[in-house]
Amino acid sequence: MPLLYIRSTEQRTRKGSVERSYHKIMSSQPRPRLTPEEYLKIERAAEFKSEYYDGRMYAMSGGSYAHGLIISNLVAKLWQGLVGKRCSVTASHVRLRVSALGLYTYPDIVVVCGTPAFADDQADTLLNPALLIEVLSASTEAQDRGFKFAQYRQLESLREYAVVSQTEPRVEIFRRQASGDWLLSESTGPDATCRFDSVDCRIALADIYQQVSFSAGAR
């Protein structure tokens, strides 16, 4: 049964704490502050991806084999479910701008419905996702549930945000309500099915976790 999880007013009251948590998680080393324009210039020429927040760049680490499998399985099933619809799905290669002066990041999976909107004519920084999915790991779970979710809620186009476990078959989907509140729907167990209302798509957890071994350590 869906559970009322977050009211829109919480975003304002918790903003300071989640931002401090993000800085603590991402880096403890002082670095020169950059403008978003400086970040994008560096990032577009870089060999490796980095996120950006509050004037700082943060190098992104690699994920586990299970992490990659889950993303691939989800993208494949979403692609099948989106055939014939005005929606498209991409994996973690697409950069997302949450706000002009705020977070630039690379969600694990992004779904856009309608015409994609970009920050500039480079068409490599997306602005209008309908669905975002992050596959959790031990090193990023607190960030994905806390800071990033608080940031993602600022996106007017976003209808759903999902977090997917890689240690057990579990998918949590947060849905934006007309009131601005968010409702949580949780699917657990290998026989369960999760529902992405924003794109009218149902996916069996058995398909999401195909060939995933839960005995392997998640990171």
Image (cartoon, rainbow, N blue to C red):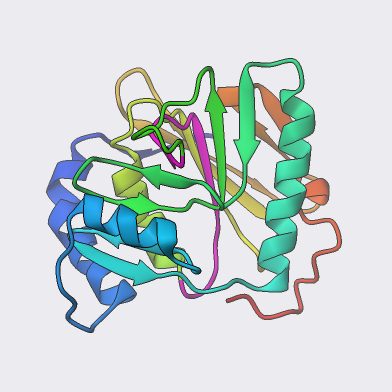
In the image, is 131 to the left or to the right of 154?
right
Please identify the quarter of the rendering in which residue 120 is found: top left
Please identify the quarter of the rendering in which residue 143 is found: bottom left
Q: Position of residue 84 (x, y in %)?
A: 75, 15
In the image, is 79 to the left or to the right of 196?
right
Which quadrant is the N terminus positioned in? top right
Q: Position of residue 156 (x, y in %)?
A: 33, 26
Which residue is found at the position 77% from the left and 50% from the top? 73
Q: Is residue 61 above or below residue 42?
A: below
Can residue 168 be seen from the camera position used here?
no
| Residue sitting nearer the eye, 192 or 96 | 96
User: Which stretch appears magenta?
Assistant: 124-139
| Residue sitting nearer the eye, 103 or 39 | 39
| Residue sitting nearer the eye, 91 or 45 | 45
In the image, is residue 129 part of the stretch drawn in magenta?
yes
Q: Position of residue 189 (x, y in %)?
A: 74, 53
Please identify the quarter of the rendering in which residue 90 is found: top right
Which residue is found at the position 28% from the left and 78% from the top? 27
Which quadrant is the C terminus positioned in? bottom right
In the image, is 73 to the left or to the right of 106?
right
| Residue sitting nearer the eye, 176 or 29 | 29
In the image, is residue 114 part of the stretch drawn in magenta?
no
